[in-house]
Amino acid sequence: MAEIKNVTGTAFIVAEYRAEENSAPDPLYRDSIVELFLNDATKQAAASALVASPSAKEGVKLRTRYLDDALDERIARGCRQVVILGSGLDTRAVRKKAAGVAYFELDDKATLDLKKTRYSERGLQAALTLIPANYVTDDWIVLLAENEFDFDLPTHIIWEGNTMYLTYDGMKRVMMTIRERIRYASLSFDYLSTKVIDESTGDAGLSALVEHFARLGAPWITGIDDVYALSDELGLDVIQNVLTADLHRGHWPTRPMSSTFLRFYSLCTLATKLESARSTQSRS
């Protein structure tokens, strides 16, 4: 399975975009914690990426809101564990603390060490276990087991900004592992259309964005054409699937989209059959 290379650097770009929403007049969310990781260098990196496609920033903000809402919904339905794969500078363990809910984050040691240091400096507490690992090459299920993860508890998995960096088979293996090893599991993730990967959208600005991430050493290599067919193949249920363009229209009805990017970028929540049945019963 191909390794994800240099994705840590993109985490700072994403964090900058996420932080910007804090100063909006009517913000989609609030993330005051993310400011702990930012400086002049991260602002410059984010500005450079933005030149390629302004909609990339909008995509980050919309997916943050979607994933926050999905997490809130799963916790309301009885989720008691949250696993964040390739967590980067995700701050939900602090922002979304809930009684009886434990968080597990997996990412490279340098990223998690930075997070641990910044949280410690500010005295921030959370029910959070940081697991240094490359979940693509390491057996992340074994690592969870070694860190007191309970495979019998309802679990929500957040997989943000990752699928496009994996091979298609590698992406499917992660999903299959979730289905096979975590009985009561839901999974929220984002994905690109294969047209973005193939640079066949007809949007020169979007092609420039693809090439920009390739130059960063973090190329986008995988898209999904039909998430419903994929979920059927894997034996998972689609709880929700939405284009970020539709989220844009819903949250910002008077704001024009700055490029076609959001028409090719989606967010999805899947669940195992047992979790679908359990969570439905929890609300009945």
Image: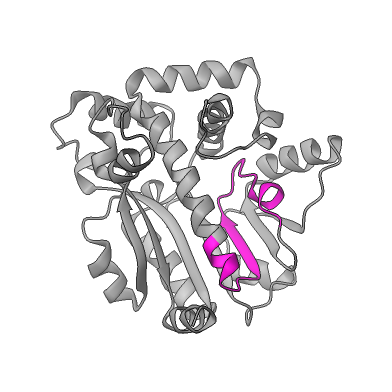
Q: How many marks?
A: 0
Magenta stretch encompasses residue 159: no
Q: What residue sits 60% from the left and 74% below the top? A: 78
Q: What residue sits 24% from the left and 47% below the top? A: 193
Q: What residue sits 51% from the left and 31% below the top? A: 26
Residue 7 visible somewhere in the drawing: yes
Above-or-below relation of 115 to 227: above
* Horizontal relation, residue 105 to residue 243: left or right: right
Image coords of residue 212 (percent x, y): 35, 26
Q: What residue sits 42% from the left and 52% below the top? A: 2
* Horizontal relation, residue 95 to residue 159: left or right: right
Dividing the picture into quadrants, the one containing residue 123 is top right
Image coords of residue 230 (percent x, y): 27, 67
Image coords of residue 80 (percent x, y): 66, 71
Magenta stretch encompasses residue 85: yes
Dividing the picture into quadrants, the one containing residue 161 is top left
Nearest the viewer among 45 and 128 is 128
Residue 136 visible somewhere in the drawing: no
Q: What stretch is highlighted in magenta?
A: 73-97
For the N terminus, the image quarter is bottom left
